[in-house]
């Protein structure tokens, strides 16, 4: 049966190579610089905050007029800080200083061999400590998963949590993404890729799942999801809403939006505005 062992080793070696490729490609950065307020383009050094840290490119945009507070926006996998500009503009027009980073291995921030939700969350935690006051934390897709992880570990620094295009369980989300690339590819290589994802996470994929972290979050939460989301079904958003403590989360479903479009629509931004106006001062969702 030695040939079975060698075939298994070859399969795992191929999957490791594919995992490394998928870590690097494709990248889908966008170009959309802030066009409001006063823009501070800065670099945040995370090397003293984490043993494997690096440099993060960050926009901090000061609104015109009175400042109400801070909002930190977390982009998704393959993207960069520019992807969150339209969401930040909405909050900036409400009077919030908006902070838009590119996480490690994205945009022009430092390279990182195995970037993912955990490294995203580490970068968010560094920025929360850098800002050193409670914020609106807004995450999209993988950035939403990272936002929950960071909020669970830093409850005093997150006042409101907004999750767009989020998932429930990390393993399930990865499996669905592998299948979305190509069903044959997903069924053949998905199990090996998931195994390497578990190994590289220290077998903590389950612990990083938003569904498991949600009960620990004691702040008002707005969940945003597109009815036409081609990556994560809207039923996952409904499951996630129920996972948070009773009365703390609300779900807004945009019936005509996909995974990447939802937060960019006028209807969604109005929902965000109403949520923030309702909850920012009290820190509670209320009736």
Image (cartoon, rainbow, N blue to C red):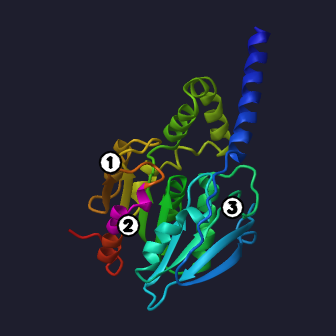
Q: Is residue 32 visible?
A: yes
- Nearest the camera: 189 or 259? 259
Q: Which mark is residue 238?
A: 1
Q: Earlier in the sequence, mark 2 or mark 3?
A: 3
Q: Is residue 267 magenta?
A: yes
Q: Badge 2 is on which residue?
A: 269
Give the residue drawn at x 58%, y 70%.
100
Q: Residues within 10 Å of mark 3 (few under 14, many from 20)?
A: many
Quarter of the figure with residue 247: bottom left
Residue found at the very far top of the displayed protein: 1
Q: Is residue 48 magenta?
A: no
Query: What SS does tag 2 mark?
Result: helix
| Disc 1 to disc 2: CB gap under 8 Å | no
| Disc 2 to disc 3: CB gap under 8 Å | no
Give the image location of residue 62, x and y in percent.
Answer: 54, 84
Specify start and end residues of the magenta stretch as a single range: 262-271
- Horizontal relation, residue 228 to residue 141: left or right: left
Give the residue drawn at x 49%, y 37%.
172
Q: Earlier in the sequence, mark 1 or mark 2?
A: 1
Examine the rendered structure and indicate whether residue 108 appears above or below residue 281.
Answer: above
Quarter of the figure with residue 188: top right
Q: Which mark is residue 207?
A: none
Give the image location of residue 226, x and y in percent.
Answer: 38, 50
Query: What SS does tag 1 mark?
Result: helix
Give the residue drawn at x 53%, y 50%.
208
- Horizontal relation, residue 4 to residue 233: left or right: right
Q: Earlier in the sequence, mark 3 or mark 1?
A: 3
Q: Which mark is residue 107?
A: 3
- Horizontal relation, residue 141 to residue 22: left or right: left
Q: Is residue 220 visible?
A: no
Give the image location of residue 92, x and y in percent.
Answer: 46, 78
Give the image location of residue 107, x and y in percent.
Answer: 69, 61
């Amino acid at each position: 049966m030695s040939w079975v062992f060698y075939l298994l080793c070859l399969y795992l070696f191929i999957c490791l190579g594919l995992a490394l490729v998928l870590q690097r490609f494709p990248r889908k950065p966008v170009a959309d610089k802030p066009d409001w307020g006063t823009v501070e383009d800065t670099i945040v050094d995370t090397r003293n905050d984490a043993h494997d840290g690096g440099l993060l490119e960050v926009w901090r945009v000061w609104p015109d007029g009175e400042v109400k507070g801070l909002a930190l926006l977390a982009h998704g996998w393959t993207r960069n800080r520019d992807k969150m500009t339209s969401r930040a503009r909405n909050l900036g027009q409400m009077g919030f200083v908006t902070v838009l980073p590119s996480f490690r291995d994205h945009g022009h921030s430092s390279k990182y061999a195995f970037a993912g939700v955990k490294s995203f969350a580490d970068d968010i935690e560094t920025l929360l400590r850098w800002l050193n006051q409670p914020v609106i934390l807004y995450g999209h897709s993988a950035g939403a998963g990272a936002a929950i992880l960071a909020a669970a570990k830093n409850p005093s620094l997150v006042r409101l949590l907004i999750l767009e295009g989020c998932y429930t369980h990390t393993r399930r989300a990865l499996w669905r993404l592998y299948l979305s690339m190509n069903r044959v590819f997903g069924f053949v290589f998905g199990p090996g890729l998931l195994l390497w994802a578990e190994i590289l996470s220290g077998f903590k994929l389950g612990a990083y799942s938003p569904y498991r972290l949600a009960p620990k979050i004691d702040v008002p939460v707005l969940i945003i999801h597109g009815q036409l989301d081609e990556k994560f079904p809207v039923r996952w958003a409904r499951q996630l809403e129920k996972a948070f403590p009773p009365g703390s989360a609300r779900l807004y479903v945009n019936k005509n939006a996909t995974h990447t479009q939802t937060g960019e629509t006028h209807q969604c931004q109005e929902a965000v505005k109403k949520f923030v106006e309702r909850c920012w001062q009290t820190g509670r969702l209320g009736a």
